Amino acid sequence: MESKRGFTLIELLVVIAIIALLLAIIVPALKNAKELASGSVCLSNQKNLCLAWTNYSSDHDSHLVGGSNYYSGRGTPYRWVEYPLLSDKHNPEVTAPASTAQYSLETRKNGIRAGRLFPYTEDEELYHCPGDKNYTKPEPAAVYRSYAITGLMNGEDFVSRSGGIYTPITQFRTASALGNKTLYVVTKMSEIVSPGNKHVFIEEDVSAKGQNVNAGGYVLLNPWWWDWPAYYHNDSSTIGFADGHAERHRWQNMNTLKLMRGEISSDPDPQNNEDLKWMISGYIPKR
């Protein structure tokens, strides 16, 4: 009777080596594909948020929804979202928001539902990028909202108001990096120059900066990068624009990518960063 011949040790090692090689090729490709897929969902989120943002303005005589969820100082009235709340019916100007010890997925979503944009979205998941896994961390670090409104779109990027948050802005900030250019905060859609090129919603990873809630908004030019986009989509980020469209932008400069990955804390050469120049051009809505 003929005996059955098995694999030799060398043949087994060759098979294992081939499998390892295939995994080395396939796993990164699958990771990239997953990030790109999450980017498609994120892009849809941004488009819907932009639609809600423009619809709010249309319903309120061209006025923009408040882009900062601070309640004093650099806060804005009629905020698009609120801090975590114990109830989505609470007004944080009257009832204190949740304490840090009370942060949870529910109190964070209460803050979203209490915001002025929620009647136009009616979906908390639009405020969260599927590539953002911060919500899986233990509280109080489990930030859920992935997007911020830029500081000059009726946001926090100014010096002072004449009184409380319902009074006009009396002192605007200047950007020393741009020769002390005045950074005007727009409060109406009609004040925005070239809305198809102006950023409204930016992906921002505040957890990477040690924050446990996405407060205020997205700010640039202090003097260069102050905030920077999140790193969720394979060297690219999704951005929503004032004309209602959204796009995925791929970053070109290695210093930008290092900032986003947390490998450096500041850009060593911001003057020559083409990504930063592009961001600045979209950050300033009024010339």
Image (spheres, grey):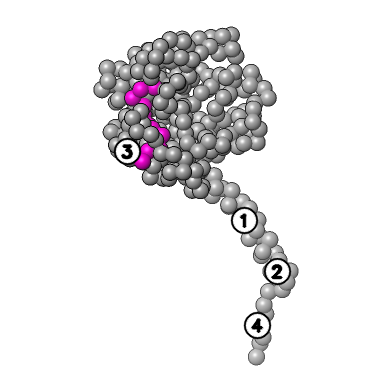
Q: Tell me the SS state at disc 1.
A: helix
Q: State yes or no: discs 4 and 1 in contact (Cβ < 8 Å).
A: no
Taking depth in this image into account, of 172 and 240 the one nearest to the observer is: 172
How far across and how far down the image is residue 193, in percent? 41, 13
Residue displayed at 58% across by 8% down: 179
Q: Tell me the SS state at disc 2.
A: helix
Q: In the image, which is nearer the foreground, mark 4 or mark 3?
A: 3
Q: Amino acid at mark 4?
A: Lys
Q: Amino acid at mark 2?
A: Glu
Q: Amino acid at mark 1?
A: Leu
The magenta-colored residue range is 76-86
Residue topped by disc 2: 11
Instruction: Say the numbered circle drawn on residue 22.
Output: 1
Taking depth in this image into account, of 227 and 236 the one nearest to the observer is: 227
| CA–CA distance in space, label 2 to label 4 | 16 Å
Residue displayed at 59% across by 48% down: 28
Question: Main SS type for the magenta part?
Answer: loop
Residue displayed at 56% across by 37% down: 210
Q: Quadrant of the N terminus?
A: bottom right
Q: In the image, which is nearer the foreground, mark 3 or mark 1?
A: 3
Q: In the image, which is nearer the foreground, mark 4 or mark 1?
A: 1
Q: On the picture, is 34 further left or further right than 21?
A: left
User: Does 190 appear in magenta?
Assistant: no
Indicate which disc, 4 or 1, sits on the residue closer to the N terminus: 4
Residue topped by disc 4: 4
